[in-house]
Image (tube, grey):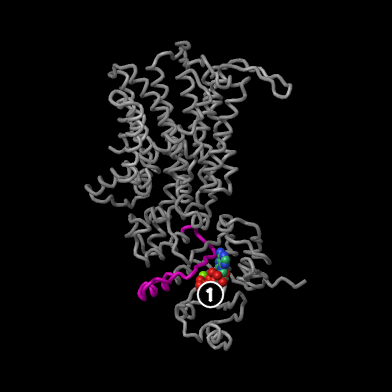
Amino acid sequence: MRRSLPFLWIAFLASVPLWLGDPYFLHVLITTGIFTIAAMSLNLLLGYTGQLSLGHVAFFGIGAYTSALTSLGFDVNIFGLRIVHEPWPVVIGFVMGIVVAGLCGYAIGKLSFKVRGAYFVIVTISFAEVTRLVALNWVELTQGPLALNNIPPFTVSFPGLGEHTLWGKVPNYYVMLVVAVLAYAVIARLVRSRIGRAMIALRENEPLATSVGIDVTRFLVLAAVVSAGIAGAAGGLYAHFVRIIDPDIFLFIYTVTMVIMVVTGGKGTLAGPIVGGLIFGILPVFLRAYASPVAQWIIYGVLMILIVFFLPRGIVPAVRAWWENRMGAAAVERTGAPIERAGADAHS
Amino acid sequence: MIAPPSSAHAALSIEHVSAHFGGLTAIADMTFTVDDGELVSLIGPNGAGKTTAFNVITGFLKPTQGEVRYRGISLSGLKSHEVANLGLVRTFQKTSVFGANTVFDNVLIGVHRHGTSSVWGTLLALPRVREEERRLREEAWEILDFVGLAKRAGELGGALPYGDQRLLEVAVALAARPTLLLLDEPVSGMNASETISFINLLGKIRQRGVTVLLVEHDMHLVMNVSDRVVVLNYGKIIAEGAPAEIQRNPEVVRAYLGQGVKRA
Ligand SMILES: Nc1ncnc2c1ncn2[C@@H]1O[C@H](COP(=O)(O)OP(=O)(O)OP(=O)(O)O)[C@@H](O)[C@H]1O
Ligand SMILES: [Mg+2]
């Protein structure tokens, strides 16, 4: 049952475009999915290593710009050196976006080598602001505030079937879903492993973790790289779906949105960012029909305060605790064999 | 230049180590050794510098002077996790567990250094990595059996009664499979019967060939289990020898034992 549950979920999500008639709502689902991927990536850092990255949108934006520019091509002068880049296929741009975002994550992780807690927050905020200023002012490369237009959509090629450009919403939904499932799988495998336990150990009790030989810095850097890479993937998806990006993509409010998704859903749980992402991604659509923009923001804020106040650990841990209460506490199984059981469940 | 005091057989040698906090001298020119298989106790009044000595040995604090060597390797400049990977594992005076994790997970984190799984191996769930995970879990169960916490495996570390938390700390340290175990006041907070079973456990740990450096205020325990005792006062070693000698040493009696201290 437990093993087949993820597959049932994937099957359900894959069926959505088949019965959902409303293209606008499908559009909302795609952007919600993209932001949920970003929230999942933030959760790896915030929820598992306990480090709050308040500049997380930088990795998202870097992925978006890298992927867009790689597939659009550019022609810039750097200190008299002219660099011309011919347009490359979108898929390569997408991978480049992940790689460049991951490298930036590495740099931030290394930089934050000794700076934890509040300093880590400041380093990440500053980093996001710097990237925004670069996107705004390096007009030759990024068009600055004029935005990068006409970003090509994804193309897929199947052997024997030729190449297809994904113009519509339905194919984009499936691309998003594939990336989301992969991102989830990467994070799930990591956090349920010895590597993930080292990250959790860093979060829970750093001196104790180092006293048993865990190189916490190494795992913090690793988490930063993977987290940034996945955020970059989300950014790439966004760029090729919306097909226009400007420096506003780096706005602080997007990071805040991701943090809200993670915290309300339940940080340090695999399902938390998905629950939070769906709530705060889809809610605005329903509210739009009934409430003015100002009222929307108020409802947003009140809802968040209520969740944090009554469920301080987030929705998923609260539901799980309620469920385990009803079913009786799960006993730890003695067998060493199934990895998903026992200890791993405490964090999943 | 003074000749190095380390004997050829000493596993751990602390050589002329000093540590300062601003103007305060926490340890002054400390020199002693621990041989393989020995149980050495480090005792002294509150503030004598025992915990500071542990911090220096295990890389949590840089000494202002001197050097620590383990099996011939200098520990100078090593980070605490690197020291642990040489087999020196310590516990903390203030109870320190992974409170939000289960007892089993606490120990599973402790066995970390026996794994080698790579990121790619983990992401691809390679058979080698699964096999390693199975082995680590077996090791964790074995440790829980060894210290007698297997029944509590599913409980949260932070929710255990105090005595059991202290035991869990030792379990986590043992999980890292130390060759030299440094225990900082392990029985403080334990009741009498817990202390007795802890003495038993200490015997079993030694049977496994683990060398022990113990800091403890419970003199009854110290005099019972130690091969040698090192006495510290105001950061200086004032006596060193077999338990019987230490109990008769007038300076030790005046500085520490004479106060009638059981638990200062
Ligand atoms: N981080 C620190 N900053 C400043 N002074 C410190 C620090 N840690 C310890 N000290 C001081 O160094 C001296 C030695 O402290 P230490 O903790 O090593 O004593 P101890 O022998 O372990 O005492 P106890 O039996 O109370 O645990 C004390 O005077 C203490 O106040
Ligand atoms: Mg102390």
Q: Is residue B214 in view from this perspective?
A: no
Q: Position of residue B254 (x, y in %)?
A: 55, 87
A303 or B58: nearer the viewer? A303
B15 or A282: nearer the viewer? A282
- Is B42 covered by the magenta stretch? no
Name above or below for residue B188 compared with residue B81: below
Is residue B79 shown left or right of residue A330? Answer: right
Q: Dot 1 falls on which chain? A: B
Q: Position of residue A47 (x, y in %)?
A: 43, 43
Q: Position of residue A273 (x, y in %)?
A: 38, 36
Q: Is residue A286 in view from this perspective?
A: yes
Is residue A173 shown left or right of residue A55? Answer: left
Locate the N terminus of chain B by quadrant.
bottom right
The quarter of the rendering in which ligand 1 is drawn is bottom right
Residue at which label 1 appears: B41
- Is B185 covered by the magenta stretch? yes
The span picked out in magenta is B175-201
Question: Picture quarter containing residue A10?
Answer: top left
A222 or B3: nearer the viewer? A222
Which element type, helix, strand or loop, lies under badge 1?
A: strand
